[in-house]
Every structure is written in structure tokens, then in C-alpha cells.
Amino acid sequence: MTDKKIVARKLQGFWELPPEKQVIFEAMLDKIKEVFQKHCFLPLDTPAMELAEVLLAKSGGDIDKEIYRFTKGSTDACLRYDLTVPLARYVAMNENTLSFPFKRYQIGKVYRGERPQKGRLREFYQCDADIIGDGELSLVNDAECVKLYKDIFQNLNLPVQTEISNRKVLFGLVSGLGAGEQFSNIAICLDKLDKIGEENVKESLQQLNLNESQIAKLISLVKLNGNSSVLQQAEKLSSNQTFLQGLNELKQIDEYLQAFGLSESDYKFNFSVIRGHNYYTGTVFEAYLAGNRGAGAVGGGGRYDDLAGYFTQRKLPGVGMSIGMSRLFDIIQQSADEKIEFCKCAVIPMGETINQCLHLVSLLQQKGISAEVYGENKSFKSKLKEANKRGVPFVAIIGENEVKEGKITLKDMASSSQQSVTKEELINLLR
Amino acid sequence: MTDKKIVARKLQGFWELPPEKQVIFEAMLDKIKEVFQKHCFLPLDTPAMELAEVLLAKSGGDIDKEIYRFTKGSTDACLRYDLTVPLARYVAMNENTLSFPFKRYQIGKVYRGERPQKGRLREFYQCDADIIGDGELSLVNDAECVKLYKDIFQNLNLPVQTEISNRKVLFGLVSGLGAGEQFSNIAICLDKLDKIGEENVKESLQQLNLNESQIAKLISLVKLNGNSSVLQQAEKLSSNQTFLQGLNELKQIDEYLQAFGLSESDYKFNFSVIRGHNYYTGTVFEAYLAGNRGAGAVGGGGRYDDLAGYFTQRKLPGVGMSIGMSRLFDIIQQSADEKIEFCKCAVIPMGETINQCLHLVSLLQQKGISAEVYGENKSFKSKLKEANKRGVPFVAIIGENEVKEGKITLKDMASSSQQSVTKEELINLLR
């Protein structure tokens, strides 16, 4: 071995939690997966890399500077930058064997080689669930995505309210006003309502050469938000067919959500929800923590017409929801106890009792209790200190007296109280 | 959208299971993690990439042709090819804040850009658990690794027997025979005993200029295998101090394993277990399926003196076990039912009863039963066929009659029998 040491460094902006936080993260993942599984979504685990021609199909081969791309031998590959392109590739590859509607969830890391800054990482987790239809897809699925937010966040003890709109409503209104060609620009302006306020939005709409009556209608629409009744109120704004179709879709989703048992606290309609992505063609939604809209959306998604148009002639409409994992984890770790229990009971020998300790640890684990022995050649005192530092709630002590009496001393680390117990009593106390 | 389609292809040799197999794989992962957690191992999730200078520290910067390496901006990075170098980097980076012994497990994908062939992938899962000490580390931890095999494979309903040796035993014997400088070559020859047989091994030892008495001793050692009694038998072969130290360590581990409650069916000693890796310095072990040694080792590991010598002056001895995930998964999917139940109950409307179906699905999910509605605009018959194809065991049918009577028709797909039940009865039957 050389004496010259390499400095142990991690790549900046890459995901790595200390183990005590990783424990919290994994518990969060498990609770999310549990809900997807109850909803019969199938897991998918695609490679971290895709062929460059596949990953860049959408952009016609133009490489985005954020994408990690490299060649090895004759392989020209990129690291995935989202989970949607891999899904499209997967469904197109397997379109003849998959059962539709195909419901999949995927939780995995994606890569974007931008300069790291607070809240923007080069490697981070995405969590997506999508339902893909073959040719057509019922609005029941859009409602199911909204239900997923409710159930997942309920399972995390963080109630959310999902805010729902439909791109057809805004597009129909704009078209009805004779400004259809300006749709993208108008959508961009209106999307800023929350951030820059009504007056500034009006000003930027004027710059798009919209007149006062047009602007008034647009503003009336995006200010509408609330329960089912806003769908009736919106009806008065336009008689455009696309507009009315969008409203009818929302009414249908409202009915489905009520059938699912969701209430007004779980969702509302909000026409200022626009979602930047151009591929959304119908329902769009964003989920916000109940009573903490200011923390920003913790999830979003919507309906698209064509998942895999770059790969296949087959029309594959879909609806998908995603969860902002980094933001969600920030919220969860703030509310979690600083010391998450990864070990229920440390077993510490006093004197030559290591074998008795190993026997006990084995027994506790068999009974489903997480346990470990502190078997290093260190003082009893330093081991007790270690258990305290690690946040272990209970310590079982076996000394030579305990062995003679067939008992164990159980120390409750929170109260510092001790009691002498049998193995059976110990198991009952710890369970 | 363009009419020219890109062929949807996956990179060859990269890991991707069809969802129905992924369900089995995830269930396997959960059972493995459950045992690590019960043993109080902490999860670690390091980045897929490391700085090239860090990843190549061991080789002094020489790049192995298997490694995926690339630059982006000023970053020179590689994809990880195992989970050990990232562990060494992590522990060295955090040596002043970690609690030792540091017990971590990691299950993640690693990357090796070799030509893919049967059983060799470019992207595959590794599963490692290691215990790292600060300066020293008790043999209790070596025993715990052997216990992990027992508990993990028991949880997977695949009993294993772990075969244990100690590199000091062979090294001591070879040194005592005056052939210490030839140790690596001798180890390579002896490691082939299983494959090429005793006669061929003898021949290759002769080519190393060993005499008949030396060869006889070596062969006697590596043919020794069985329970504790072989440790006594081995004692007669040499009085070399390192040799005897190795045997004493094995005796100590034997005692710890018995204290843990492991029996002869769970482990044995086998001096032909050598493990190629030069970094193993003490205990080495390999796990084999009970009654199916021919399937090859499903795991292996051992003790090393110095985890992170390339990064830090601090001596960090460790012991680690790994599981061969691809081989294990092959075995598990062969024994698993072809159709794993990812959906307990499909709910199918007959007529205009979609809302009642959504209500029922929601209720079932609340009760912990995985369920989904078949809500697409397709015939009842085709939906029943679909449920059958997907391997769903139960179908709940709600028609207009059922709505009137407040009942549900439950169809058992295996027997094709039907019965009319209330919601409460349905929940009880499905649970």
C-alpha cells in the first residue's frame, strides 16, 4: 500500500444521505410503494442508461447540455434525465405483450449535469406513476391519480389537497377569443399569476396585443377556484366546444372522485393550474400540503395524448402523477424525530457473558425485534454511552449475576430506569 | 410529431425485468432488507458515479477497460463497478462522525462495460453488508455475517449452509512449509480443487517446485471439511503460529455461532474455501444452498485488515458478506409461481355501475386489499378475460341488480365459482 493518500471526496450535487437520514428516506419510500401496490400498479426498474438515439429521440438528436452522454466501444449512451422517456421506450418495445391499461410506478435516480445549487441536484430521485391506454383511456384513470395523492400523503401523515384543471378549458377559451395561435405565450403569462400578481399578468397580456375584454375573461377564468360549483360558474365564460369539453371532463372526474370517497378537503378545481409541459393535453393537477400551500407543490401531473409517438405508430394516451421527492423528504425529515429507531435493543455484556448475549440477540431478532450485541473489547461504560449516542431506546445487560439468576437487566434509556426481567418478560416489554 | 420512428431499443446487458418478474424481485429485496434491519444494519445509498481519482485510487489511476468513465465540464467521473470502493470513500470521508463499529448494508446497481454474455451483465445488482471497526474488530462480527446468511435465506425459504475457512490457516501452513513466497500461486492452484480434481491440482503444485511431502500436507488441509472436529484434526498439520492463530479464530467463531443458535446444518468448516480476493486476511466464507451445492455459491465474503488505506491513515478493519443477486433471483423465480399476485381483486362494472365500483375499490384498498377497477370502455367478457390473463384470483362484479340488492357477485377465478355477498362478507373473504 502506498503512503500517498487520495482525498476521499464525493461528486458535488450527488445524492447521499447519512445513514440515520437514509433510514427515514427508506421508510418514506416504503409508505409510498405500499399505496402504489394497493392500487395494483406494477413496479418498473429501467437501466440508468439509455442509447443516445433513444434518449434524444424527442429532441431529434440535439443534445441538451444537462445530459450526461458518453461512448464506450461502439455504444453511444446517456444517463436518463427523467423516468418518462424510459417508460415510453419500454412500452413501445413491449407494446405487443403488455396488458393495457398498463399501470406502472417507478422510483429511481435521474441525472442532470447542471451546476449544482441549493435545491438542484445532479443526481436525484424521481417518483412517477402512469397509466397507459391502448388507443383510448377512461377518465377514471385521471381520477385515480388524484386519489393516489390522497392515499400516499395520508399514509405519510401529511394530508394534501390536489388542485385540478384541464388544458382544454384554457385552450378552448383562448381559441374562442380568437387568440389560439398565442396559446403558449398566454399560458406562460397566466402561469405566473401566483408569483407576480394580477396587475403584472394583465400588463404582460396587453403586450401580447390582447384587448381588455379578452384579458378580463382570461383573468376571470384563472381566478376561479373551489369545489364543483366553479365548474358551473366557468360555463358562462365561453361556448367554445373544446372549452366545454374540458369542463365536462372535469365534471366527470369530479363524479369519479366523489365515488372514490374523496371530499372537498382532498381536492378542488383551480384554473390557474396550467403546468408548463406542452405534452399535457387534458387534465392537469398539482398537489399541495393541506394548510401549507406556500411550501410549493409536492407533486403534479396530467393527461397526455401520446406517450411514445417517437417510437411507435400506436397511439398510447396516458395520465401520470409524480411526487417531488426532494421537497417531500425535506418536509418529512423536519417533522421526524431526530433519532429514528433503527435498533430497538442493544445487548451489552458485563464480564464474560458474550455467548449469553449472542443467544439473547438471536432470540429477540427471531421475535421480530431489531437488536444487536455490543461485542467489542471496550468498557461497559463506553458501550452504554454509545447506545445513548445512537438513540437506542432499550439496553439489555447480562452480567454474571444475571446469568446465575436466569435474568436480564433492562434499562430504559429515556427514563434511565432499570428492572430485572426474564427473557419472556423482555420480549413482551419490547414488542 | 415526425413520422420517422426511432427503434425503441434497450442497451444490451442492462438490467430490466418485465413487471411481473420485477414484483418477485422486489419481494425478494424486501425479505433481504428485513433481516438486515433486524440486525441493526444501516442502509447506505451512494451515488452511481464517483470521481475517477477516487474510484481508481486502488489501481493507482490505471483504468480498467471494464469501467465506464467520462468527463463533463471539469468533472472526470466513473460509474461505480462495485459497492466496496464507495463504502471505503464514505467511511474515510466521515470517519470522525461515524459510530464504530459501523454496520451498513447497500443494495444497488453496479456497472461493468464488458461484452455481455449469459450470466454476465453490464449493469447488475450487488448486495453487500459490512461491519467496519475503528482500529480493531471482534470476531463476533465474522460470526454475525454467517448468521446473516442463515437468517436471510431462511426468510426466502431457501436454507443455506455457509462454509467457513480462514486465510491465515493456509498461509501459515504454506509458510511453515517454507513456501511463503509462493502463497498466491499455491492458493490459485488449490482453489481449483472442486473444478479440476485432486490429481490435476497435485500436478500444478509440482510445477511450483513443491515436493511430495509439502503437496501431501496441502492436499490434506484442503480436503478437510466438516463440523468443529475438523479444527482439531487440522491442528496436527503444522505448528506455525499464523496457522494456529487462524485455527483459533475459527474455534472462536464456532463458539459464537453456537451461541447464536446456529447448528451444523447452517455452517461447516471447509479449508478449500479460499476466495480469490487478495484483500481478505482472515475469515473467509461462501454460502451454498442446502442440498444444491452444484448451483454454485449464492454468497461469499470475509475479513479484511484495512478498508480504506488509499484514503486514510486510520486503520479500519472490516468483515463483509455479499449475496449473488442475479444467481439468487434466477433460483427464486424458478421456484416462484408464474403469476405472482399483484392484484387481489379486480372490480368489474356491468352496465352503468362505475361509481359503485369505484366506491368498492376504495373500500377494499382501505382494508389493505390490493384492488383496481376495470373502467375502460370494453365489453364485460373481455374484462373477465383480461383478469384471467393477469392472474387476478378474485373478480368482484357489480351490475344493476347487485346495486338494487346491495350485493356484489364474487367470482373465484381458479374454481370459476360465483357467490353473492355483502361488502362486509367480501372483505372478510378477501382478507
Image (tube, coloured by chain):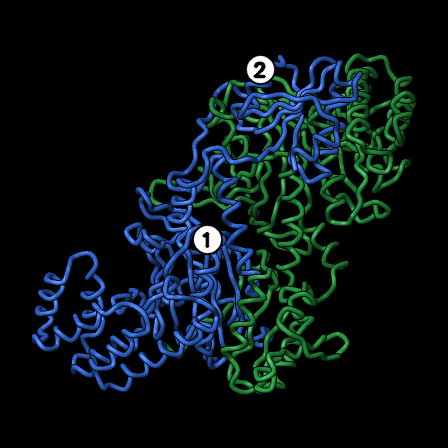
Chain colours: A green, B blue
Which label was assigned to residue B426? Answer: none
Q: Which residue is mark 1?
A: B71
**Total marks in image:** 2
Q: Residue drawn 79% across and 37% down? A: A162
What amino acid is found at the position of numbered circle 2 in the picture? Ser
| Residue B126 spot, x, y in % from top left | 44, 54
Evaluate whether residue B318 shows in this view: no
- Name the residue that disc number 2 marks: B382
Q: Residues within 10 Å of mark 2 (few under 14, many from 20)?
A: few
Q: Give the vertical position of B19 relative to B298 (above or below).
A: above
Residue A429 in picture, x, y percent from top left: 70, 67
Q: Nearer the viewer, residue A144 or A278?
A: A144
On the image, the x and y values in percent for residue B169 come to 27, 77
Q: Position of residue B35 (x, y in %)?
A: 53, 58
At mark 2, the secondary structure is helix
Q: Amino acid at mark 1?
A: Thr
Mark 2 or mark 1, which is nearer the start of the sequence? 1
B161 with respect to B270 (left or right):
right
Dot 1 falls on which chain? B
Q: Which residue is painted at 20% across and 61% down in the image?
A: B192
Residue A140 in the image: above or below residue A122 = above
Chain under label 2? B
Quarter of the figure that contains the N terminus of chain A: bottom left
**Along the horizontal axis of the image, is A391 left or right of B260?**
right
Q: Is residue A132 above or below residue B296?
A: above
Task: Please tell me whether mark 1 or mark 2 is closer to you in this view.
Answer: 2
